[in-house]
Structure formats: structure tokens, C-alpha cells
Image (spheres, coloured by chain):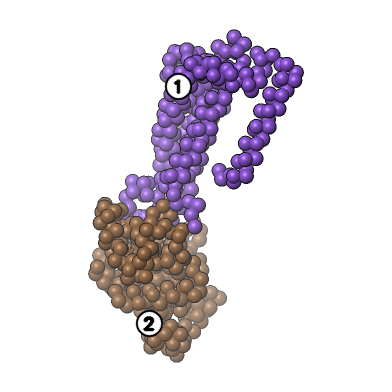
Amino acid sequence: MTMSTRDKLTAAGLVIVLIGLWELVCRAFTVRSYLFPAPSAIAESFVDNARLLGPATWVTTVEVVLGLLIALVAALGIALLLHASPTVRRGLYPLLIGSQTIPIVVLAPILVIAFGFDIGPKLVIVALTCFFPLVVATVDGLATVDPQLIRLMRTLDASRWTIFRRVELPTALPSVFSGARVAVTYAPIGAVFAEWSGSTGGLGYLMLQSTSQLRTALVFAAVIVLAAESITLFLLVTWLERVIITWKDKK
Amino acid sequence: MSAGAAVRLTGVGHRFGDLEVLQDIDLQVPAGRSLGVIGPSGCGKSTLLSFVSGLDDPAVGTVTVGSQTSAAGRLSHCALMPQRDLLLPWLTAVDNAALALTNRGLSRAAARAEVTPLFERFGLAGFELRRPAELSGGMRQRVAFLRTLAAAKDVLLLDEPFGGLDAITRGGMQDWLRGVLRAEPRTTLLVTHDVEEALLLCDQVVVLSGRPARVLRTVPVEYTAGTTREDTLADPAFVALRTEILRLLANGHRR
């Protein structure tokens, strides 16, 4: 994720040109706002509906963050189990991969039926969405540990726990962060799916309501907030990785 | 730190699947003495060290370190220096050197205090807080050796300790280690395929054959050390020993 200033400027310039074109096309052909709103209409909708967007963003963010934390704890736990026991690994790993063939979209309504309209099923769905990339990355990371390092640590009187803490965990960390970057970009999508399946608040709920009322500009505004949330989480994880993993990219 | 415990291998043999690597090996290192183990590449020298260290057990034969014959008992007596330095990239040089101490439960501050004087002695002063990636190959190897020494075990096991270094650095490191072992003799087993290295560092050299490795001969090392490395290497007794060992290796290989 290293971009030169020039790259950044080019990317920003491209976005501005695209938005300008979009605005131009909408005005030139007088496209109706409920069919396809111009950027200016979306911006207007942002300001007008701040009191709707604010609370909805909060609801979705809580679902995303809590769901992510649940996924992280569960994924690290299961990954350690898979790493520690080859038997568990042989039994559980194929099941885990198999579980990914069931689309969350299908699962979401069932979970809502089972758990109701409150935050419970949202957390389950967000956690399920984020769990898989985290588990796979962590298991892969733990598998890259140099066996010679473990043998060396045994000659240096290290216990099993010490070997895990000082060798296996730091080796796996960069991989865990890669998984986390994927997981945090999926999490808001999971939350919106969950809200579509039955909810009384959140960005997904707001999108459904606005769509049926033909307030298309507000739908776009909600989508932009959602994208911003994904990007923010991604940058946060990238920053955290840079703070924690200080031994890489150094001369 | 004591001068060390004696190491004895009796009738040690081993195979990996159908591949017999070691056959009926008898070896002895008296306490405080050093033994070089020389043999062709892939003859099972490193495997031999893993048996002495207690990381593994041989299929047949017994390995005794001090009074210990069990793997765990041997492990408590032996410090192993691997060919690659295997420093942990996420720890500073001083924390890498102090690994054995902190692994045993000593606080980081206390462990650092114990290891830091060694940095001065080994020409690493000022590099304590550097990460391994910031050190040169020779320095990394010295930190790895420091880590082995700081473990304060009775027996040093060196597995081609300078194999990964360039010839000039390797020569310097050999002279340096020679000085360290002279100053503080310890039971040392040095595995190498560098005949000069074995002769420079050891009291005795054992020559192994190719696979399955057997002991071809045990050669006592006696020559007049010169004031410089070049003088020593040119000493007639040194040259004769080197020629004898090279000849043994060549014959052992041809068979």
C-alpha cells in the first residue's frame, strides 16, 4: 500500500473527472433524480438527511465493529486449534471450507427468523462473513513457522507456550493482518445484508426504505457512507499493522 | 560456568526410512575438550548433533551427556548453534542473545543486564538495540554465538557455524572463536566440512565416511600455532594434518 504523491494525485484527479462527467450527463439529458441522481443531488440529500444518516451509520457501525471482534476471537481460537492438532485440522478444515459454499444471502433470512429483528442475527452474519478470511490467513501464517526456529527454541529451554508467544505468533501476525484487511472490507457488506433481511435501523434499513420511496439520492448517499466505512476500516488495519509489525521493511 | 560435561556416543546408528545415515558411531569428548566432526556433505553430521543435543533420539545406540542419557536430560546440558543464525527478526540483538534467560522466566531487564557485558567483549557494543536485519552477517553470527554462550550450558554444539559467511568473514570469525574457546574452554562438538576450521578450533578431529557414515579415524590435533593465521596455516604439522584428513575424506568417499 505505498502510493507516491503523483499516484495519489492521478487517482484523485480521475475521480473528480468521473464525477464531473456524471454530473454533466445527468444535466445534459435531464435525467430524473429518482432514476439516476446527479452528484449534486446526492450531496444535497446528504445535507438534508443528515439526521437520518447519522443514527443509521451508528447502528451499522456498531454491528460491524462488534461482529468483527467476535469473528476475530473465534477465528484466532479455531486457527490455534487447527494448528495445534493435526486431527482437528483434518476433520474441521474441510468442513470450514464447505461452509463457505452456503451464501450468506441465503443464511441471513433464516438467522433473522431464528434470532429476531434485534442486533443478534446482524452480529452473527457479520461475524460469519469475516470469519473465513481470518481463519484461513491465520492458519496459513502459523504454517509458515520455520521448524528450525522451534528446534532452536527447545535448546534454549523454551516451553510450548513460550515458543508460541515468541516464535509462532509473531511469524503469523503479518498473515493475520492480511486476513483482517479482507475481513474489514467485507464486514459492512455483511451488516447491510443482515439489515435487508429484517431490521428497524441501520444503513441497510435506510436503503430499503429510501428505495421503496424512490428517494434514490438518499440510497446513493447511504452507499457512499458504507464505502467510506469500509475504506476507513481498511486504513485503520493497515495503520495498526505498521505500528505493530516494526521488524519488516527495514534495512 | 563449568568447563563442561563429557559427551559419549556408543554404537549410535540411524536410518530415515530406507536410507541408513549413521552406522555404529562411537565418539568421546572429554569434559572441557573440543572435537571436530568432519565428513562429506549429507553424511549425517547434523543428525549426529541433533542426537547429542537431545532434540532427537537415535534408532540404536546410546548418547550420554554428563550423566544424562534421556533426550530431555541431554537437552538441559547442551546449547546448539545452528548454521543459519536463526535470530528472531522481531527482537533486538540483546533480546535475541538473552533468549535462553528470558525463556527460563528471568525478566527482560535482568536478562539484558546479564548479557550486555558480553556485547562489549564480543565487539558488539553499541549494537544491543539493533534488529537483526540491521546487522552484518558476521555480527549476526556473533549474536547467535552469544545467545548460545548466554544459555550457560555445559556443552557447546556448533553446526557449521560459519557455513553461511563469505571466506574473509569466516576466517575472522574462526580466529575470534578460537580466542573465545582458548579463554574459556568448554566441551565443544564442531560439525563442519571445512578441514582448516576443524583443525583451528578443535583438540581432536573425527573423520566420517559418506553415507552411511562410520568413523574412519580419530585424529589428535597437534601443531605449532603461529602468531598470525597465515603462519598457523603454513605450519608443517598443520599442513600434514590437513593433507591426511583430506586424503581420508577422498578415500572414504570413493569407497
Dot 2 surroundings within 10 Å: few (below 14), some, or many (20 or more)?
some
Q: Which chain is purple?
A: A
Q: Please indicate whether residue A242 sits to the left or right of residue A157 in the image.
A: right
- Which residue is at a point 30% across and 76% down the rendered structure image? B183
Circle number at residue A58: 1
Residue under circle 2?
Answer: B220
Q: Examine the image and state in which quarter residue B91 appears.
A: bottom left
Where is residue A145 shown, x and y percent of the image?
Answer: 45, 49
Q: Secondary structure at mark 2?
A: strand
Whole-percent x and y of residue A136? 50, 37
Is disc 2 on the same chain as disc 1?
Answer: no
The relative height of residue A53 versus residue A133 in the rendered view (above or below) is: above
From the rendered image, report the letter of the chain displayed in brown: B
Whole-percent x and y of residue A68? 45, 29
Residue B229 image offset from top left, x and y in percent: 43, 83
Observer-nearest of B244 and B1: B1
Q: CA distance from mark 1 to mark 2?
A: 80 Å
